[in-house]
Image: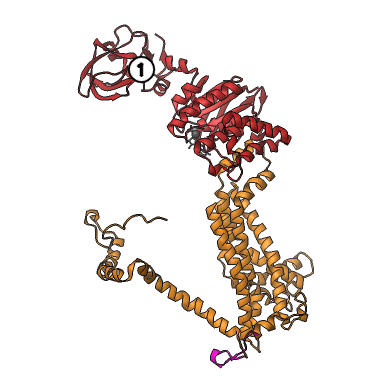
Chain colours: A orange, B red
Amino acid sequence: MTMQGEAPAGAGNPAPQQAPARRSIGAVLAAPVGLLAHLLDGPMRFWQRLAGRGGMIAFFLLPNMAVFALFVIVPLGINVAYSLSGGTQLFLPSRSFVGPENFARLLTCDNHLAPATCRDDLFWIAVWNTVRFVALQVVVLVAVAMTTALILNRSIRARGFWRAVFFFPVLLSPVVVGLIWKWIFQRQGLLNWLMVEMGLDPVNWLTDRTWAYVFSVGISVWAHAGFYALILLAGLQAIPRHIYEAAEMDRTSPARAFRRITLPLLWPNLLVVIVLALIRAVQVFDEVYVLTGGGPGTSTMYLTQYIYETGFASTLRNPGVAAAASLMMGGVLVVLTLAQIALTRWRDRQ
Amino acid sequence: MGQIRLQGIRKSFGALEVLKGIDLDIAEGEFVVFVGPSGCGKSTLLRQISGLDQPNAGRIHIDGRDVTDVGAADRGLAMVFQSYALYPHMTVRDNLAFGLQNNRMPKAEIASRIAEAARMLEIGHLMQRRPGQLSGGQRQRVAIGRAVVRDPTAFLLDEPLSNLDAELRVSMRAELAALHARLKATMIYVTHDQIEAMTLADRIVVLRDGEIEQVATPMELFNRPANLFVAGFIGAPRMNLIDAAEAASLAPGGLPRGAAWVGVRPQNLRLDDAGAELKVDLVEALGTETVLHGQLASGTRLIVAQAGQVDAARGDTLRVAAEPGKLHFFDDAGRRVEP
Ligand SMILES: Nc1ncnc2c1ncn2[C@@H]1O[C@H](COP(=O)(O)OP(=O)(O)O)[C@@H](O)[C@H]1O
Ligand SMILES: [Mg+2]
């Protein structure tokens, strides 16, 4: 971006030659602001002369930075402090310093693939549950989002309506998502009622390990696919129609057009979607927690739930371990986020 | 190969009827240009021929075969798009090869066709580049090359030169003419530029509001326009149209029966002391030609084009007359009336 010259001279001052005969409501409301700007003009200029151009930039960024620091940087620092402290006390100054003990506790295993051999078996159960969840959820999510986008990109009847339908779940609060599906899947839920009506035996969906896992993946796909479908749809619509027509003239089969034209041209968007979906899948919590509570047993307990329960909910809460686990998860997310930023830059250069 | 017949082609988009019954025979190897004002349906007609779009009524035959219900892929035609529509993520070579690979052509054959087209269009040095790394003119060549390698029954070109600058347009025009002479394939070319139409076409199809106004060779079109629309559309500056009652001052002599309008091209008016008075209000001196705009005593506007340079200025009054035998006559419905 280059600077587009100077701002119009006296931007805060009324411009008499443009003053409309009847003042609009907006102009009336803006008048006090204009007055304020006018009053501030002198001090600001003086301040800018003192601080210089770079100083002004810092000055205007300060409020935002202060909020960012207060709610992100400071808590992060406190989190690090907690991760190095032990005991069940919640108040930081009354906690003892234990060094990397919490990390050691989390990371010590005879065999990392077998949680039972770990000092903190729950953590590794949660880790592997999360890995399993992410692996399936991201694949299914991207496939569903892609299919939805491809269908919505066709000239189907009532396209706007269908777009809204697929996007709607994204607008729901995760707790609402979890509750809706709980009403459907629970023992006396909608699904079992239907099955009984159809003469089938009811199934206890949420106390079955496999079903609980499948449904935890399923509802999170349902809740998020619309969002990614929209990103992909935007990417699809950015591909000029003429390219497909040229391909048609070139006798390209639809499958080959998808593979050789749609996929490569959509690839930058697709990559961004995959990484975004990965980042969000690693953090899975609310809707699944509401649906299954992590059960049956620990079969749908994912990392965020482990952190939450270890830090706040269990009777023997251990904020130090929870902080250490959240820092490690944060590390993974930072890597993924950096990848996502790099990919977005790369896409925008394309 | 490459004979195309259109019968009663109609096309509507919703309530908007864009093509209102087009009948046309295109001969093998012919260079046919569809010309007409923007929005008259040229591109739409070309798309019906290509198969990218289906007409609501009418039949399309290619080499005697009814292809109305055949998809674009199987009509054996190649299209050059106004936007070029190159595959942006593929190299020039892959752009050219893509369609051939679809036909499962042997690698060696693909390579030799690409080499041939590259030589013809002088794009050999661009083979490893992507479209984004090419200039407009180079993209245009690649787009044409993509059609050429296919060795199609006919080429369909939709305003292929309209995105080029004026100078490049002139040189590409000449190259297209040379390409046609060399390939001897049927070409259907859409443009709104009458100069392109006149210089390239074997035959010109003048379209207006989804109907054919006239189909003729460029000279026939120029010399014997079938109606007022064609008369006004072909030739620059535009043909002067004068009420028949007023024509006597410019061209003594009788009018054919039924003539309501007299047309005379600016080039067919000359300075003549016995002619009508013209009050000049604009002089365009082009060096090789001088174009005088002015008004007759009656207020009728007139454009006079004189070869070479004329010593005239705004405000001058000149006397002009039409060259005998160079008048066009039209009845009150706008149709040509033979003298
Ligand atoms: N796909 C379409 N849907 C609706 N209207 C269209 C479509 N394609 C063309 N038209 C309309 O048909 C008319 C002719 O368009 P076109 O054939 O592109 O004109 P041109 O002679 O400039 O190439 C225009 O009024 C245009 O708006
Ligand atoms: Mg057009």
Q: Is residue B105 magenta?
A: no
| Quarter of the rendering occupied by the N terminus of chain A | bottom left
Locate residue A182: give its quadrant.
Answer: bottom right
Image height of A106 relative to B272, above or below: below
Magenta segment includes A94: yes
Residue A11 seen anywhere in this rendered image of the structure: yes
Q: Which residue is mark 1?
A: B265
Residue at the extreme front: B125
Furthest residue toward top: B253
In the rendered view, does A187 fall on the left or right side of A93? right
Which residue is depicted at the point 25% across and 69% down? Answer: A42
In the displayed structure, A253 sits above or below B299; it is: below
Chain under callout 1: B
On the rendered structure, is A197 left or right of A179? right
Q: Residue at the spot x=31%, y=14% of the render?
A: B269
Q: Position of residue B136 (x, y in %)?
A: 50, 38
Looking at the image, residue B242 lies above or below residue A293: above
Magenta region, residue range: A88-100
Where in the figure is residue A244, as x and y percent of width and height? Answer: 60, 42
* Residue B105 drawn at (x, y percent): 72, 34
Foreground of the two, A315 or A64:
A64
SS for callout 1: loop
